[in-house]
Amino acid sequence: MALTGVLRPGFTQLRVLDMQASIEHYTKRIGFHQVTEGPDGRVYLKSADEFDHHSIVLRRADRAGVDITAFKVRQDSDLDAFAGRIADYGYPVDHVAAGDQPGLGRRIGFRIASGHRIELYAKADQSDPKPAQHNPDVWQVEPHGMRARRFDHSLLYGPNIEENLDFFVKVLDFECAERVDMPNGLLAIWLTAGMKAHDIAFVNHPEPDKLHHVAFELENWNDVGHAADVLTRYDISVDIGPTRHGITRGQTIYFFDPSGNRNEVFAGGYTYYPDLPTRTWDETQVGKGIFYYERAMNEAFLSVVS
């Protein structure tokens, strides 16, 4: 499939309470690498399997959560086209100059109905470590920690997700791969820009601009088991898992960083094509949809956000 417009998740900027503990968590435990620290104290991380300059930004703050969820688009002219479409939809658009984050070109930003800030950008420098391009080995730098391969997706909590669905489909050209419908309305949506089961998801929640989790891709189910060993060895707080989702079919563990931001390691999931129908779940099977083996949701998963 020839991808145009929005390609994939680019980076997320997280608020953390203890920068050194957070760097250790995301580098030594999850398996990312520190690329650089900016003059304002923000720290930029990436996986050795990612080409672009960074995919995780850590910002020291007095409360945990997410500042930005950003997507990469195919080419610079897409930014102007999307800026017009977003403004026509009724959302104010602001412009972030190239170099605001090291290694990134200009960005456009806007706030969606659930209260979250979304950004789009086209240009990113490459940074080390990164995959080889000529006669490439499976890895150039030996994987460590949980062996995360990339920033995969975010799940965000907030109100008005019906409008989020309308906006992402009509304006950003995403598709809705799965959804949960309850008797009182839409509970959750899983949206994709390409061929993954999801690139971003939203759950209906009364408080705006909340983070449920950021997810990092692992290669396979064996790596999910290895991640569980890492979590136990270092006494990292676990929410649930290892287990599997019915929705997306991904294999998963949920756990918390030192600031209380929920993380997920995720493997598998089905391939999505834009001609496929949206898969739907209702209140009778939503527990099985979220946690396929347990067939029920735990209280922390429903209530704890940052």
Image: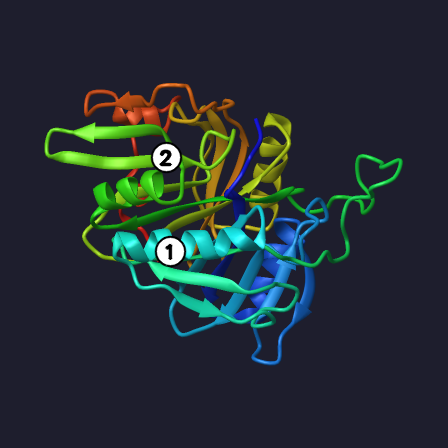
Can residue 200 be seen here? The reply is yes
Residue, x 64% and y 57% (percent of image)? 124
Q: Quadrant of the C terminus?
A: bottom left
Q: Quadrant of the N terminus?
A: top right
Q: Is residue 115 left or right of residue 253?
A: left
- Numbered circle sitting on residue 239: none
Tell me: 201 left or right of 77: left
Q: Position of residue 16 (x, y in %)?
A: 47, 66
- Left or right side of 56 for 280: left
Of badges 1 and 2, nearer the viewer stands: 1
Label 1 sits on what residue type?
Gly
Does the residue at mark 1 contact the one at mark 2 (Cβ under 8 Å)? no
At horizontal 51% and vertical 31% (from top left) the residue drawn is 196
The foreground one among 96 and 70 is 96
Question: Which sits in the foreground, 180 or 262?
Answer: 180
Residue 125 against residue 285 in the figure, above or below: below
Where residue 245 appears, x then y in whole percent?
41, 27
Would you identify the image quadrant in which residue 46 lies? bottom right
Amino acid type at mark 2:
Trp
Question: Is residue 104 positioned above or below 49 on the image?
Answer: below
Q: Secondary structure at mark 2?
A: strand
The image position of residue 239, as x and y in percent, is: 41, 43
Q: Which mark is residue 84?
A: 1
- Answer whether residue 112 is visible to the viewer in this image: no
CA distance separating discs 1 and 2: 25 Å
Instruction: Name which residue lies at 29% across and 40% down.
Output: 165
Check the image and name the residue furthest to the left.
184
Badge number at residue 190: 2
Relative horizontal placement of residue 142, taking residue 224 as reference (left or right) = right
Where does the image place residue 110, in percent across and percent down from the top left? 36, 61
Give neighbour class at mark 2: few <14, some 14-19, many 20+ (Cα, 10 Å): many
